[in-house]
Amino acid sequence: MNLPQYFVLAGILIVVVGFALRLNPMIVVTVAALATGLIAGKGPLEIVSLLGKAFNDNRIIAIVWIVLPVIGLLERHGLRERATATIRRFKAATAGRLLVLYLLFRQVTAALGLNTIAGHPQTVRPLVAPMALAAAEQQHNGIEEESAEEVKAFAAATDNVGNFFGEDIFIAIGSIVLIQSTLAGYGYNLAPLDLAIWAIPTAIAAFLIHGFRLLRLDRRLKRRRK
């Protein structure tokens, strides 16, 4: 066995060990990238150049530093309380029904390329989860901690499902380009539009399956309160 050829995988080991020790993720990933590059025979300047290019190509992550303080200020001034008070006005609202509507909203907007219009920090934590909890508490005259945690978990999962299965319908998303290039490497030349069209049945199936799970959540919460 030629062991040196496996040395380039040292970066993975560094990431695993670093995360296991709960070190700063940014430092761990940077050290792993530097180690992998040096083992692969690249010079320090070339490695830094590659890291800079990757950061520049994905510079949208810098928006996080703008979004989080804004969300924090909104929460400080009562955003969660107002969202909770609003949902309590609708007597027929349930956690499952509310999350089904959010699932539809998330899939439709992601399919239009607006996948960053919602997400965990900007909508789920300050709006969707509190509203779902308020609906569940109103419908069942209060819920225990286990049920509250389940509702919050379903709120987060709904955002993931809606975004993941909705974005592939948009032809200019990175995942479509990745799928197209991967298939092209195996001799399957498909246009982005072809992939987007075939993503529609999958998105519909995901909506029906997860929507059914959300409605079952209502029934499960009701049984626990009996």
Image (cartoon, helix red, strand yellow):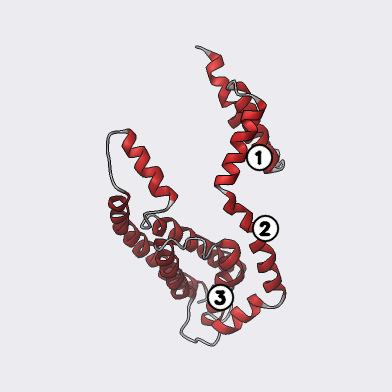
Mark toward the viewer: 1 or 2? 2
Q: Which residue is mark 2?
A: 65
Q: Mark 1 highlights which residue?
A: 19
Residue 162 coordinates in the image, percent (x, y)? 43, 62
Q: Nearer the viewer, mark 3 or mark 2?
A: 2
State the residue at coordinates (62%, 40%).
52
The answer to whether residue 2 is visible is: yes
Q: CA distance from mark 3 to mark 2?
A: 25 Å
Viewer-side residue, 218 vs 81: 81
Categorize mark 2 by other alpha carbons within 10 Å: few (<14), some (14-19), many (20+): few
Q: Splitting the image into 4 quarters, where does residue 33 fall?
A: top right
Neighbourhood count class around disc 1 (C-alpha, 10 Å): few under 14, some 14–19, many 20 upward? some
Residue type, mark 2 in image: Trp
SS under mark 3: helix
Identify the mark nearer the N-term, 3 or 2: 2
How far separated are the C-alphas under marks 1 and 2?
23 Å
- Mark 2 lies on a secondary structure that is helix
